[in-house]
Amino acid sequence: MAKTSGSFQKGHKGYKPKGAISKITRSVKEVFQAAFDEMQETKHANLLTWGKENPNEFYRLTAKLIPAAMEVKADIQINDITGVVILPPETKDK
């Protein structure tokens, strides 16, 4: 088998697959998750208390966690319409 660039050979399966999380990253995330969970049990240090005291920051951070492609569904009810104006689309003269 011919060597490819680097020390791996074609068909080598000894590497981390795309998107896989390393053991260190996984461990750090687990430690932070445990600390976060414990903090939520303390009324003065939980996310709900902070969010109520800092609603602008809370919603700014929350918006960053929502995927950009997320579909938002809403029922909208409009009362008291006083008038509707429908304009034709603008056309280019040729």
Image (cartoon, grey):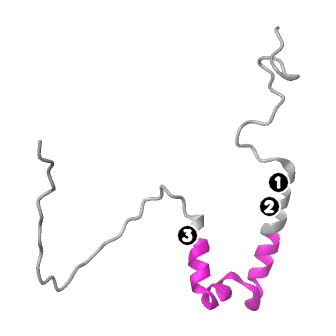
Image spot of residue 58 (x, y percent): 61, 79
Q: Residue at x 76, y 75 (%)?
A: 37
- Magenta segment: does it hold 78? no
Write the start and end of the magenta stretch as one range. 34-62
Q: Count of labels shown?
A: 3
User: Tag 3: residue type?
Assistant: Ala
User: Tag 1: residue type?
Assistant: Thr
Q: Which one is earlier in the sequence, the residue at label 1 or at label 3?
A: 1
- The residue that label 2 is drawn on is 29
- The image quadrant of residue 59 is bottom right
Q: Secondary structure at mark 1?
A: helix
- The image quadrant of residue 13 is top right
User: Tag 2: residue type?
Assistant: Lys
Q: Nearer the viewer, mark 3 or mark 2?
A: 3
Image spot of residue 74 (x, y percent): 35, 70
- The residue that label 3 is drawn on is 63
Q: Residue at x 58, y 72 (%)?
A: 62
- The image quadrant of residue 33 is bottom right
Marks 1 and 2, how far apart at CA: 6 Å
Q: Secondary structure at mark 3?
A: helix
Relative side of 19 to 58, left or right: right
Image spot of residue 27 (x, y percent): 85, 57
Q: Secondary structure at mark 2?
A: helix
Q: Is residue 75 above or below residue 19?
A: below
Secondary structure of the magenta portion, mostly?
Answer: helix
Q: Residues within 10 Å of mark 2 (few under 14, many from 20)?
A: few
Relative side of 84 to 22, left or right: left
Relative side of 57 to 28, left or right: left
Residue contact between numbered discs 3 and 2, judged by CB atoms under 8 Å: no
- The residue that label 1 is drawn on is 25
Quarter of the picture holding the C terminus = top left
